[in-house]
Amino acid sequence: MKGFIKQYGFLVSVLVLNVCLLIWLPRTGADALVFTGKSALTFLINLPPVFVCIGLLDVWVERESMIRIMGERSGIRGVAVSFLLGTVTALPLYALLPVAGMLVRKGSRIMNVLVFLCTSVSVRIPLLLFEISSLGFAFTAVRCAANIGSLLLTAFLIDRILTGQDRERIYLANIEG
């Protein structure tokens, strides 16, 4: 029972809250239930293609190639590849995390994985195009430059702060999980 609650507690609490809302505020509860259903459907539609692509990448790209391209000794080239991968990605964050886990399993440097994740969230091309059309080029350029600088600095600092034991735990967690 404890395992069930730990694994499905959030889902059960969302359903209970939706039912309570439906009972006490029927109109709002119906809207919340529709929103929850649409969100769950979007999640379920987006995730299978991501897992298929991760599986293909896992099979097609050899670990040695990934280590050479994005591993500990990849240097600026690894950061550049991570940055480019992040800018062309158009996935929600929950779909990026399995990709990041696969990159770690394949031997990518933690800094490169962080650059990929941060770039995917804040500097992706579809987001930039929308932002330019909505807020203008000048604003987008300043925000983009600030984001790039802060994400590179953050990834570098986290990479330096992590101890060898921390790295070992991260790599083991991704191999086992």
Image: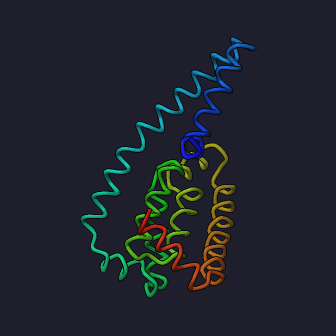
State whether residue 100 is above or below residue 52. Answer: below
Instruction: Give the farthest residue toward the right.
Output: 24
Query: Which residue is found at the position 54% from the left and 79% from the top?
Result: 167
Up-down relation of residue 166 to residue 126 (above or below): below
In what quadrant of the picture does the N terminus appear? top right
Quarter that holds the C terminus: bottom left
Residue farthest left in this picture: 60
Q: Is residue 158 left or right of residue 47?
A: right
* Quadrant in the rendering for residue 153: bottom right
The residue closer to the viewer here, 172 or 151, is: 172
Colour convention of the picture:
rainbow
Q: Quadrant of residue 20?
A: top right
Count the numbered circles shown. 0
Residue located 36% across and 51% down the image:
51
- Residue lying farthest to the front in this orientation: 1
Q: Residue at x 47, y 49 (%)?
A: 91
Whole-percent x, y for residue 146 in the image? 69, 66
Residue at image point 57% right, 83% down: 165
Depth check: give the residue in front, 53 or 121.
53
In-front residue for pair 25/1: 1
Residue 39, image x, y percentages: 54, 33
Relative to residue 130, is residue 42 drawn left or right?
A: left
Measured as percent of width and height from the top left, residue 99 is found at 43, 59
Question: How far from the left and from the top, in percent, is residue 17?
Answer: 68, 27
In the depicted structure, whether residue 76 falls above or below residue 175 = below
